[in-house]
Image: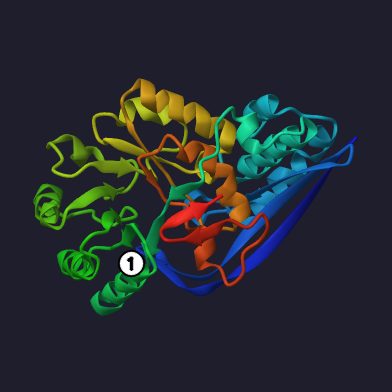
Amino acid sequence: MRRMQIEVLELPLARPFAISRGTRTAVTVIRVTLEQNGFIGRGECTPTPRYDETPDSVEAQLEAMREDVEAGLSRIDLQSRLSAGSARNALDCALWRLDAALAKQTLWQQCERAAPPSVITAETLSLDSIENMAAAAADAVSRGAILLKIKLNRDEILEKVAAIREAAPRATLIIDANEAWSGVDLHSLLTALQAYNIAMVEQPLPAGQDQDLQRFNHPIPVCADESCHTREDIAELRNRYEMINIKLDKCGGLTEALAMVEEAQKRDMRLMVGCMLGSSLAMEAALPVAMAAEHVDLDGPIWLAADSSPFLSYAQGRIWL
């Protein structure tokens, strides 16, 4: 018999995390632990209000699957039993790790991928004043950060980017607008941002309202985040975006994420791997996908007051495995 345990945990943040949609001081995660024949597999997800999820709704989805999961539901069958989202992610990753444990393999071996010594990850600059964001950039690069992800809304865009570039002259900079740039002249803004050597802009317009991206050639690559959940979304995004951001909580786990990599590569879409706030348990599950990505943004644990096992080491702008 297989047994399933569900835990709902609130993880305090070390400092406030602000984006265009609001500010958080803690994050609620749900962890699934599967035990079978003395072997254990665990998964973690972060319910996201942007996708109409709450901890209660995700826990209810998982409880509804308990009988089938404990009867031996496979990872493949799970894909058609739960829709894409954080509940399926937690179960899918727990099943991946359980299958690996039963086979006496690592997660990397189960994915048929070789684990690298380290992976470069973005360090996120939370939305703040010009001065505070520049100071955060200077602090990040002083600790060895290589890639900075700038959270922005519609206020003082160029001024903030200019101050951050001055504070971090050699870092790679990417911008995440979190759907906040409606009504902005995007062509003029992206053209102006070229002066600061911006590598990519993520989700400038709301999902479903991003048709304006079709009307001009982008001076800077644009990445779909909220507009892209699963492999079914990729084909119709090619005329609006150059890149997609794969997140396990959006797509419903490692199984779908690996399928998205294949689909994106077939359609010549560039790849980013991102995350919600969460612990190393959630980030480690996304690392096999990160090997195919141009940009990796798996810095969730550095925002936590305390991380959870398995602990990943973050130093010099990298995740050390």
Q: Position of residue 316 (x, y in %)?
A: 42, 61
Which residue corresponds to the image point at 63% horizontal and 26% vertical from the top-left? 80
What is the three-letter code of the residue carrying label 1?
Val
Q: Depth check: give the residue in front, 226 or 110.
A: 110
Which class describes the residues within 10 Å of circle 1: few (<14), some (14-19), or many (20+)?
many
Q: Is residue 38 left or right of residue 237?
A: right
Relative to the observer, which residue lies in front, 232 or 139? 139
Q: Is residue 209 visible?
A: no
For the N terminus, the quadrant is: top right
The residue that appears at 68% across and 35% down in the rendered structure is: 96
Which residue in the protein does label 1 denote?
Answer: 141
| Number of numbered discs | 1
* Residue extending furthest toward the top: 266
Q: Relative to residue 275, is residue 179 drawn left or right?
A: left
Classify mark 1: helix, strand or loop: helix
Q: Position of residue 236 (x, y in %)?
A: 32, 27
Residue 147 horizontal/vertical position (percent):
33, 56
The x, y position of residue 190, in whole percent, is 14, 50
Q: Residue furthest bottom?
A: 131
Quadrant hosting residue 295: top left
* 275 vs 162: above or below: above
Residue that appears at 63% across and 58% down:
311
The residue lying at 38 percent from left, 27 percent from top is 264
